[in-house]
Amino acid sequence: MNQARTPAATTAPADPEVEFIDIDDTGNGADGSAGGGAGGEAGGGYAWEEEYKRSWEGIREDEAGSLASTVANLQLQKKRRRRLRDTESVQRGIIRHLFLILDTSSAMTDKDLRPSRMELALSTAEAFILEYFDQNPLSQLGILVTRDGLAEKISELGGNPLDHIRTLKNKRNTNARGEPSLQNAMEIAMNALGHAPAHGTREVLLVFGSLTSCDPGNIQLTIQAAKAKSVRCSMVHLAAEVRVFRELCTTTGGTFSVAMNEAHFRDLLFETIPPPPLPAGQTRAANLILMGFPKKITATIPTVCACHNKFTFEGYLCPRCKAKICELPTDCNICALTLVSSPHLARSYHHLFPVANYREATVAELPDEPFCYSCTKPFESSAGQLTSATKHGPPVTTAPAPHVPAVGSTAIDAGTSRYICPKCRHQFCLECDLFIHDILRNCPGCCTTQ
Amino acid sequence: MLDATADTPSLLVIVLDISPFAWARSPVAFPDALKQCLAFMNAYLALKHDNLLAVLAASDKGCDYLYPTAESEPAAPPGESPTSDLPDGNLYQRFKHLDDQILARLRQLMIAPEPEGSLPVPAVRLTAALSRALAYINRLTHGDNPVPLQPRILVVSASADSSAQYIQMMNCIFACQKLGVPMDACQVYGDDSAFLQQAASITGGVYVRLAHPRGLLEYLMFTFLPDRFARQYLVTPEQGSVDFRAACFCHKRVVDVGYVCPVCLSIFCSFSPVCSTCRTKFAFTHLAPSGRPARLLRGRSGRHRADSRGLPAAASGGPQPASPAV
Ligand SMILES: [Zn+2]
Ligand SMILES: [Zn+2]
Ligand SMILES: [Zn+2]
Ligand SMILES: [Zn+2]
Ligand SMILES: [Zn+2]
Ligand SMILES: [Zn+2]
């Protein structure tokens, strides 16, 4: 395939979820954004007033309903998405090397996603970078942009999120123009990733808005090269599915997805944040890594730090060469030892020991606890029982009040909105379920038994 | 968070260690300490009329809310506690209600039967209490009807760290960090608690180990009473140095340079051919060096080639395809 463009005609039969997408990328504003998703409240107003060809089924149902039910529905949808995540304790590539490739071609100026594809991609990428380093503290990330048939590395593989965000902020006022080049971007990314140590993963995450790619050579060779170098490529596309793009992702073991709206785009991007499971039976050469765990010191007299040559009171002392470093994790500026603090390592341990998914309680199990175990929010449907159960004293969760009548639960419909931990059998509200799995990563009930 | 002003009410969640094992050896008896804590709670509530308070008790058996118990939130029924419910002329009703409720609840917990299947390990369920405290804070500050609050957590601990709870403790600390909740810690006696020290350091809280445990109330009042806003103007106790060193998984020995498994991040103090956590086999040959030497090497060879391919074409500026791929 030596032609300069990967024509839009190669678009494969679209996913069921993107069936309604307008393939014609150049049509101005024809494919508007679905303002649904979690941003439904804010962006919804605009979205309804325009003509759309995107999939609407999900939101139409809510049209007649009140806002509260819409929000509840969206929460449940969000939750359902999350519930699909596996909680099995698999081997994961915790030390990652990832290149984020952003399309900055003219296709990104489209305003079908608010405020524009470009703005959305940049602002979401910033949030992505913060979250990426939060969950993968020992990992590295680099950024590439591509336009005018060229690719440019705007930040090297590095571990400091603030550096990357600063570079992205600078990119905000550059013009999006021309066409992206998948091949050029991939070549640069693969070149840089080729030097990543063998114990880490090599990944590329592409955010594309264009349906074409301006490539100098045969893209198939690049795809094969990526596969040979075990570079895992994933793409979140802002418009539609393109066969070549999908092929790149599936061949290299990554995922390809198309964003339906702003919130969906964010979700898709953030789904790539947990470290990917290692393919079973992968015999990668693993090497133990030598790391130093510096002590934090606060001195009464400021001394010069090794990283910025500034006088500081606080710092971390490299255990090998005793140089003072301002921030962790980093490599020692003097002796190149990888310096981390034990909390950095611990931040990744939840990937190894994930909290089991809670399941929604059935009506039969209901009367056990009238309150959410962790936040003491009374369960709505048991408001009647609540008074009778607790009138004569606070509930003792270790010994549930025996006089709560089981018949009281008949009023509760199928959606109980209580969630039970399969291990400790305590019940939680939706809010806590999300909090426990997304942020806390401890089951409060299981903590008492472990 | 940062936008907290002087008028933002506080939400203080106190996690109180009530393990009899720990308090038995304490220089200050538990009833005394409890009295001082109650005085502190009263003082806290008196500070601002809309300050919110929650108290959790953590023992070796488990943990539970002392205040507010679930039904006391909507309407505070004054009576029905085992102690006399006559209004006390010398005590503000809200304080009396709080004191009565906490004492009644403690009594209940003390006589509560052992939960089935509990292990006879006298480790305080601190992380369980912290997890519930965080869920509580999350509901009030990020739930359906969030109100502007300055949440914080105060741990009053008399026990030593339980290394079995290390990962859970770390999860709690990171959750605190994400919610912007500083975790204050007051170690009543004994050795410094490395967990609580790290917690305070990471979340921006205050850690104090009492030099004179009998003066608990004084420490509480002077160090932990001011809210985050007020603390900007105060000199809070600082931790001279925080130990961020890790314990190796093989001998539980504290190391400052160790070997880390790249797959599961287990820490070992010496080279081992197989990771004991995830069973990854390691190559004997050379240990992976830290990033720097590799990066220098790359700068000389690969990177420049990649760049030079892109740059000249960029100068020409045309939409033509770049030079053929290598
Ligand atoms: Zn510095
Ligand atoms: Zn050093
Ligand atoms: Zn809850
Ligand atoms: Zn559980
Ligand atoms: Zn060891
Ligand atoms: Zn391992």
Image (cartoon, rainbow, N blue to C red):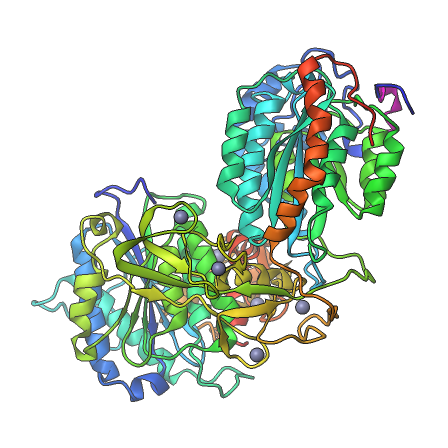
Q: Magenta stretch: residue A10 in it?
A: yes
From this view, report whether residue A19 is shown above or below residue A177: below
Q: Quadrant of the N terminus of chain A?
A: top right
- Residue B290 seen in the current view: yes
Asked which quadrant contains residue B200, the reply is bottom left
The structure residue drawn at horizontal position 22% and vertical position 83%, both measured from the top left corner, is B28
Asked which quadrant contains residue B122, the reply is bottom left
Q: Magenta stretch: residue A385 in it?
A: no
Asked which quadrant contains residue A164, the reply is top right
Residue A113, image x and y in percent?
62, 23
Q: Nearer the viewer, residue A191 or A364?
A: A191
Q: Quadrant of the C terminus of chain A?
A: bottom right
- Residue A238 seen in the current view: no
Residue B97, image x and y in percent?
22, 66
From this view, report whether residue A122 is shown above or below residue B315: below
The structure residue drawn at horizontal position 19% and vertical position 68%, both measured from the top left corner, is B219
Q: Nearer the viewer, residue A342 or A393?
A: A342
Horizontal arrangement in the rendering, residue B254 relative to residue B39 (left or right): right
From this view, report whether residue B249 is shown above or below residue A152: below
Boundaries of the magenta span = A6-14
From this view, report whether residue B107 is shown above or below residue B153: below
Residue B175, image x and y in percent?
46, 56
Q: Main secondary structure of the magenta part?
A: loop
Q: Residue furthest left?
A: B90
Residue B119, image x and y in percent?
53, 85
Q: Residue furthest front?
A: B300
Horizontal arrangement in the rendering, residue A6 relative to residue A90 (left or right): right
The structure residue drawn at horizontal position 70% and vertical position 28%, both measured from the top left corner, is B308
Horizontal arrangement in the rendering, residue A257 relative to residue A363 (left or right): right
